[in-house]
Amino acid sequence: MAATGFVTSPLFARHDTGPGHPERAARLLAIARRLEESGLLAELEVREPREADLETILLVHDAAHVRAVEEAIARGARVLDQGDTRVSAESWKAALAAAGGAIEAADLVLDGQWSNAFVAARPPGHHAERAAAMGFCLFNNAAIAAQHLRQRRGLARVAILDWDVHHGNGTQHLFEADPTVFYASLHQWPLYPGTGRESERGIGAGEGATLNCPQSPGAGDREWLGALETRILPAIEAFRPDFVIVSAGFDAHEKDPLADTRLSTGAFRTMTESALDLARKCCGGKLVALLEGGYGLDALAESVEAHVGALVGPGT
Protein backbone atom coordinates (compact mmCIF):
# COMPACT_ATOMS: atom_id res chain seq x y z
CA MET A 1 0.00 0.00 0.00
CA ALA A 2 1.23 3.49 -0.81
CA ALA A 3 2.56 5.61 2.02
CA THR A 4 1.20 8.84 3.44
CA GLY A 5 3.22 11.76 2.13
CA PHE A 6 4.58 14.59 4.27
CA VAL A 7 5.69 17.75 2.48
CA THR A 8 7.73 20.36 4.29
CA SER A 9 10.91 22.39 3.93
CA PRO A 10 13.43 24.34 6.05
CA LEU A 11 12.57 27.26 3.76
CA PHE A 12 9.21 27.66 5.48
CA ALA A 13 10.94 28.53 8.76
CA ARG A 14 12.76 31.38 7.03
CA HIS A 15 9.46 33.16 6.35
CA ASP A 16 10.07 35.53 9.27
CA THR A 17 6.96 37.28 10.61
CA GLY A 18 8.81 39.05 13.42
CA PRO A 19 8.61 38.89 17.22
CA GLY A 20 5.26 38.24 18.82
CA HIS A 21 3.47 37.21 15.64
CA PRO A 22 1.25 34.12 16.11
CA GLU A 23 2.00 32.68 12.65
CA ARG A 24 5.66 31.91 13.34
CA ALA A 25 8.33 29.41 12.43
CA ALA A 26 8.01 27.72 15.82
CA ARG A 27 4.74 26.23 14.60
CA LEU A 28 6.48 23.94 12.13
CA LEU A 29 9.27 23.13 14.58
CA ALA A 30 6.67 22.01 17.13
CA ILE A 31 4.93 19.83 14.52
CA ALA A 32 8.18 18.21 13.37
CA ARG A 33 9.30 17.53 16.94
CA ARG A 34 5.98 15.91 17.87
CA LEU A 35 5.87 13.73 14.77
CA GLU A 36 9.42 12.56 15.40
CA GLU A 37 8.88 11.87 19.10
CA SER A 38 5.68 9.95 18.41
CA GLY A 39 7.35 7.75 15.79
CA LEU A 40 4.92 8.95 13.12
CA LEU A 41 7.61 10.66 11.09
CA ALA A 42 9.18 7.28 10.35
CA GLU A 43 5.83 6.15 8.90
CA LEU A 44 5.72 9.02 6.39
CA GLU A 45 7.36 9.56 3.03
CA VAL A 46 8.97 12.98 3.43
CA ARG A 47 9.46 15.30 0.48
CA GLU A 48 10.76 18.83 0.11
CA PRO A 49 8.74 20.79 -2.45
CA ARG A 50 9.84 22.67 -5.51
CA GLU A 51 8.82 26.29 -5.84
CA ALA A 52 5.76 26.85 -7.99
CA ASP A 53 6.34 28.93 -11.12
CA LEU A 54 4.46 32.14 -11.78
CA GLU A 55 2.16 30.50 -14.31
CA THR A 56 0.97 28.23 -11.52
CA ILE A 57 0.28 31.10 -9.12
CA LEU A 58 -1.65 32.84 -11.89
CA LEU A 59 -4.10 29.94 -12.03
CA VAL A 60 -6.00 31.83 -9.32
CA HIS A 61 -4.27 35.16 -8.64
CA ASP A 62 -4.25 38.45 -10.51
CA ALA A 63 -0.94 39.15 -12.29
CA ALA A 64 -0.66 42.70 -10.95
CA HIS A 65 -1.15 41.43 -7.41
CA VAL A 66 1.50 38.73 -7.78
CA ARG A 67 3.94 41.26 -9.20
CA ALA A 68 3.20 43.70 -6.36
CA VAL A 69 3.86 41.01 -3.73
CA GLU A 70 7.18 40.07 -5.34
CA GLU A 71 8.28 43.70 -5.64
CA ALA A 72 7.25 44.59 -2.09
CA ILE A 73 9.26 41.72 -0.63
CA ALA A 74 12.24 42.53 -2.86
CA ARG A 75 12.36 46.12 -1.61
CA GLY A 76 12.26 45.01 2.02
CA ALA A 77 8.60 45.46 2.98
CA ARG A 78 7.64 43.92 6.31
CA VAL A 79 3.85 44.09 5.95
CA LEU A 80 1.80 43.44 2.81
CA ASP A 81 -1.75 44.36 3.72
CA GLN A 82 -1.23 47.22 6.21
CA GLY A 83 -2.38 44.74 8.83
CA ASP A 84 -1.06 41.41 10.04
CA THR A 85 0.39 39.74 6.92
CA ARG A 86 4.05 40.19 7.70
CA VAL A 87 6.86 39.18 5.39
CA SER A 88 10.66 39.03 5.19
CA ALA A 89 13.33 38.55 2.54
CA GLU A 90 12.60 34.80 2.23
CA SER A 91 8.81 35.08 2.16
CA TRP A 92 8.52 35.14 -1.64
CA LYS A 93 10.36 31.84 -2.02
CA ALA A 94 8.47 30.34 0.93
CA ALA A 95 5.12 31.30 -0.60
CA LEU A 96 6.08 29.78 -3.95
CA ALA A 97 7.22 26.61 -2.21
CA ALA A 98 3.99 26.40 -0.18
CA ALA A 99 1.97 26.48 -3.39
CA GLY A 100 4.39 24.10 -5.06
CA GLY A 101 4.12 21.67 -2.17
CA ALA A 102 0.34 21.62 -2.41
CA ILE A 103 0.55 20.81 -6.10
CA GLU A 104 3.24 18.14 -5.71
CA ALA A 105 1.25 16.41 -2.99
CA ALA A 106 -1.89 16.49 -5.13
CA ASP A 107 -0.04 15.06 -8.12
CA LEU A 108 1.57 12.26 -6.13
CA VAL A 109 -1.74 11.25 -4.58
CA LEU A 110 -3.56 11.47 -7.90
CA ASP A 111 -0.91 9.31 -9.55
CA GLY A 112 -1.12 6.69 -6.79
CA GLN A 113 2.39 7.15 -5.45
CA TRP A 114 0.97 8.29 -2.10
CA SER A 115 -2.28 7.19 -0.50
CA ASN A 116 -2.84 10.69 0.92
CA ALA A 117 -0.66 13.54 2.18
CA PHE A 118 -0.18 16.34 4.69
CA VAL A 119 1.58 19.54 3.63
CA ALA A 120 3.18 21.41 6.54
CA ALA A 121 3.91 24.72 4.85
CA ARG A 122 3.81 28.38 5.66
CA PRO A 123 2.66 30.97 4.87
CA PRO A 124 -0.85 29.52 4.97
CA GLY A 125 -3.32 30.29 2.21
CA HIS A 126 -7.07 30.28 2.66
CA HIS A 127 -7.53 34.02 3.35
CA ALA A 128 -5.64 35.08 0.21
CA GLU A 129 -7.98 36.65 -2.35
CA ARG A 130 -7.48 36.87 -6.09
CA ALA A 131 -5.82 40.29 -5.76
CA ALA A 132 -5.07 40.66 -2.05
CA ALA A 133 -2.86 39.15 0.65
CA MET A 134 -4.53 39.04 4.05
CA GLY A 135 -4.80 37.09 7.27
CA PHE A 136 -1.17 35.85 7.25
CA CYS A 137 -1.71 34.47 3.70
CA LEU A 138 0.10 35.47 0.49
CA PHE A 139 -1.20 32.95 -2.06
CA ASN A 140 -4.12 30.56 -1.77
CA ASN A 141 -2.48 27.15 -1.70
CA ALA A 142 -5.72 25.13 -1.60
CA ALA A 143 -7.23 27.08 -4.49
CA ILE A 144 -4.07 26.77 -6.58
CA ALA A 145 -4.00 23.00 -6.03
CA ALA A 146 -7.68 22.71 -6.92
CA GLN A 147 -7.25 24.69 -10.14
CA HIS A 148 -4.18 22.62 -11.03
CA LEU A 149 -6.21 19.45 -10.64
CA ARG A 150 -9.06 20.86 -12.70
CA GLN A 151 -7.20 22.66 -15.47
CA ARG A 152 -3.98 20.68 -15.83
CA ARG A 153 -4.93 17.21 -14.65
CA GLY A 154 -8.41 17.15 -16.12
CA LEU A 155 -10.49 16.33 -13.05
CA ALA A 156 -14.15 17.23 -13.36
CA ARG A 157 -14.87 18.09 -9.73
CA VAL A 158 -12.79 18.97 -6.65
CA ALA A 159 -14.05 19.47 -3.10
CA ILE A 160 -12.34 21.70 -0.53
CA LEU A 161 -13.21 21.04 3.12
CA ASP A 162 -12.06 23.87 5.40
CA TRP A 163 -12.15 23.37 9.17
CA ASP A 164 -9.92 26.27 10.18
CA VAL A 165 -11.66 28.26 12.92
CA HIS A 166 -11.55 31.34 10.65
CA HIS A 167 -13.63 31.28 7.50
CA GLY A 168 -11.65 30.84 4.27
CA ASN A 169 -12.89 33.98 2.55
CA GLY A 170 -10.31 33.77 -0.21
CA THR A 171 -11.12 30.20 -1.19
CA GLN A 172 -14.85 30.87 -1.15
CA HIS A 173 -14.59 33.99 -3.28
CA LEU A 174 -12.27 32.35 -5.80
CA PHE A 175 -14.77 29.57 -6.48
CA GLU A 176 -18.17 30.97 -5.56
CA ALA A 177 -19.25 31.20 -9.22
CA ASP A 178 -17.68 27.85 -10.19
CA PRO A 179 -19.91 24.75 -10.03
CA THR A 180 -16.92 22.40 -10.44
CA VAL A 181 -15.30 23.19 -7.07
CA PHE A 182 -17.35 22.58 -3.91
CA TYR A 183 -16.24 24.67 -0.93
CA ALA A 184 -17.47 23.66 2.53
CA SER A 185 -16.44 25.44 5.71
CA LEU A 186 -16.79 24.83 9.44
CA HIS A 187 -15.76 27.96 11.34
CA GLN A 188 -16.52 30.17 14.31
CA TRP A 189 -18.82 33.08 13.61
CA PRO A 190 -18.69 35.94 14.30
CA LEU A 191 -14.93 36.06 13.96
CA TYR A 192 -12.27 37.32 11.52
CA PRO A 193 -12.64 37.82 8.58
CA GLY A 194 -16.40 38.34 8.95
CA THR A 195 -17.47 36.21 5.98
CA GLY A 196 -19.00 32.75 5.98
CA ARG A 197 -22.64 33.28 6.85
CA GLU A 198 -24.91 30.32 6.19
CA SER A 199 -26.69 32.37 3.53
CA GLU A 200 -23.50 32.51 1.42
CA ARG A 201 -24.13 29.59 -0.97
CA GLY A 202 -22.30 30.66 -4.12
CA ILE A 203 -23.38 32.87 -6.99
CA GLY A 204 -24.56 32.34 -10.56
CA ALA A 205 -23.60 28.94 -11.92
CA GLY A 206 -21.86 28.20 -8.62
CA GLU A 207 -24.91 28.65 -6.42
CA GLY A 208 -25.19 25.63 -4.16
CA ALA A 209 -21.52 24.70 -4.48
CA THR A 210 -20.63 26.70 -1.34
CA LEU A 211 -21.71 25.41 2.07
CA ASN A 212 -21.00 27.39 5.23
CA CYS A 213 -21.70 25.91 8.66
CA PRO A 214 -20.82 28.74 11.08
CA GLN A 215 -20.59 27.77 14.75
CA SER A 216 -21.08 29.99 17.79
CA PRO A 217 -18.20 30.92 20.13
CA GLY A 218 -17.90 28.25 22.81
CA ALA A 219 -19.06 25.45 20.52
CA GLY A 220 -17.13 22.21 20.83
CA ASP A 221 -16.90 18.64 19.62
CA ARG A 222 -20.63 17.94 19.67
CA GLU A 223 -21.56 20.93 17.54
CA TRP A 224 -18.67 20.74 15.08
CA LEU A 225 -18.75 16.98 14.56
CA GLY A 226 -22.53 17.07 14.30
CA ALA A 227 -22.42 19.69 11.53
CA LEU A 228 -19.68 17.77 9.73
CA GLU A 229 -21.53 14.46 9.80
CA THR A 230 -25.07 15.66 9.13
CA ARG A 231 -24.52 18.54 6.72
CA ILE A 232 -21.07 18.83 5.19
CA LEU A 233 -20.13 15.23 4.44
CA PRO A 234 -23.49 14.34 2.85
CA ALA A 235 -23.30 17.48 0.69
CA ILE A 236 -19.79 16.69 -0.51
CA GLU A 237 -20.71 13.07 -1.17
CA ALA A 238 -23.65 14.21 -3.28
CA PHE A 239 -21.25 16.44 -5.25
CA ARG A 240 -19.13 13.34 -6.08
CA PRO A 241 -15.68 14.93 -6.13
CA ASP A 242 -12.75 13.37 -7.93
CA PHE A 243 -10.39 14.69 -5.24
CA VAL A 244 -10.68 16.12 -1.71
CA ILE A 245 -8.49 18.95 -0.40
CA VAL A 246 -8.63 19.76 3.31
CA SER A 247 -7.71 23.23 4.54
CA ALA A 248 -6.58 21.83 7.86
CA GLY A 249 -6.48 24.58 10.43
CA PHE A 250 -6.09 23.52 14.04
CA ASP A 251 -7.03 26.82 15.68
CA ALA A 252 -10.49 25.57 16.69
CA HIS A 253 -8.69 23.68 19.49
CA GLU A 254 -9.80 24.57 23.00
CA LYS A 255 -6.27 25.75 23.87
CA ASP A 256 -5.76 27.97 20.83
CA PRO A 257 -5.24 31.65 21.73
CA LEU A 258 -6.95 33.26 18.70
CA ALA A 259 -10.53 31.96 18.99
CA ASP A 260 -13.21 30.76 21.38
CA THR A 261 -14.02 27.34 19.96
CA ARG A 262 -13.53 24.31 22.19
CA LEU A 263 -12.53 21.33 20.09
CA SER A 264 -10.60 18.51 21.73
CA THR A 265 -7.49 17.03 20.18
CA GLY A 266 -9.47 13.87 19.46
CA ALA A 267 -11.97 15.81 17.37
CA PHE A 268 -9.31 16.45 14.76
CA ARG A 269 -8.66 12.73 14.42
CA THR A 270 -12.39 12.09 14.12
CA MET A 271 -12.80 14.79 11.45
CA THR A 272 -9.83 13.39 9.55
CA GLU A 273 -11.18 9.84 9.66
CA SER A 274 -14.56 11.09 8.44
CA ALA A 275 -12.95 13.03 5.59
CA LEU A 276 -10.95 9.95 4.60
CA ASP A 277 -14.08 7.77 4.63
CA LEU A 278 -15.74 10.33 2.37
CA ALA A 279 -12.77 10.36 0.00
CA ARG A 280 -12.78 6.56 -0.18
CA LYS A 281 -16.47 6.58 -1.13
CA CYS A 282 -16.10 9.28 -3.76
CA CYS A 283 -12.64 9.13 -5.27
CA GLY A 284 -10.59 6.16 -4.15
CA GLY A 285 -9.30 7.94 -1.04
CA LYS A 286 -7.61 10.79 -2.92
CA LEU A 287 -7.10 13.42 -0.21
CA VAL A 288 -4.47 16.04 0.55
CA ALA A 289 -4.50 18.16 3.71
CA LEU A 290 -2.81 21.57 3.84
CA LEU A 291 -1.81 23.29 7.07
CA GLU A 292 -3.69 26.53 7.68
CA GLY A 293 -3.98 27.95 11.22
CA GLY A 294 -3.16 26.72 14.71
CA TYR A 295 -1.25 29.00 17.06
CA GLY A 296 -0.92 27.36 20.47
CA LEU A 297 2.20 25.28 19.94
CA ASP A 298 1.34 22.32 22.17
CA ALA A 299 -2.26 22.18 20.95
CA LEU A 300 -1.10 22.46 17.33
CA ALA A 301 1.47 19.69 17.70
CA GLU A 302 -1.02 17.38 19.45
CA SER A 303 -3.70 18.04 16.86
CA VAL A 304 -1.40 17.47 13.88
CA GLU A 305 -0.21 14.23 15.48
CA ALA A 306 -3.84 13.10 15.73
CA HIS A 307 -4.55 14.22 12.17
CA VAL A 308 -1.49 12.59 10.63
CA GLY A 309 -2.06 9.43 12.66
CA ALA A 310 -5.47 9.13 11.04
CA LEU A 311 -3.97 9.68 7.59
CA VAL A 312 -1.44 6.91 8.15
CA GLY A 313 -4.13 4.51 9.33
CA PRO A 314 -5.67 2.55 12.21
CA GLY A 315 -3.47 2.09 15.26
CA THR A 316 -1.20 5.06 14.54
Image: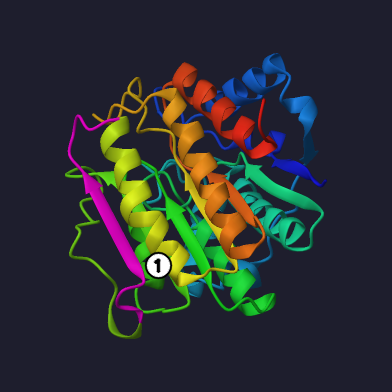
Q: Quadrant of the C terminus?
A: top right
x, y percent for residue 9: 71, 38
| Residue in view at x 69 percent, y 65 percent | 53
Q: Is residue 212 magenta?
A: yes
Q: Nearer the viewer, residue 315 or 51?
A: 315
Residue at the disc numbered 1: 131
| Residue in view at x 57 percent, y 52 percent | 74
Q: Amino acid at mark 1?
A: Ala
Q: Is 308 rendered above or below residue 62?
A: above
- The quarter holding residue 309 reads top right
Q: Is 217 rendered above or below residue 81?
A: above
x, y percent for residue 3: 79, 42
| Residue in view at x 70 percent, y 53 percent | 105
- The quarter holding residue 39 reads top right
Image: magenta residue range: 206-220
Does 307 sit left or right of 194 as displayed? Answer: right
User: Could you say whether the residue bearing mark 1 is in a helix, strand or loop?
Assistant: loop
| Residue in view at x 39 percent, y 43 percent | 164
- The quarter holding residue 232 reads bottom left
Mark 1 closeness class: few <14, some 14–19, many ≥20 residues within 10 Å: some
Q: Is 297 rendered above or below residue 310?
A: above
Q: Nearer the viewer, residue 93 or 149?
A: 149
Q: Nearer the viewer, residue 262 or 249?
A: 262
The colouring scheme, among rainbow, by chain, secondary structure or one colour, is: rainbow
| Visible residue check, residue 141 | no
x, y percent for residue 62: 47, 73
Does 262 sit left or right of 180 as displayed? Answer: left
| Farthest top residue in view | 37
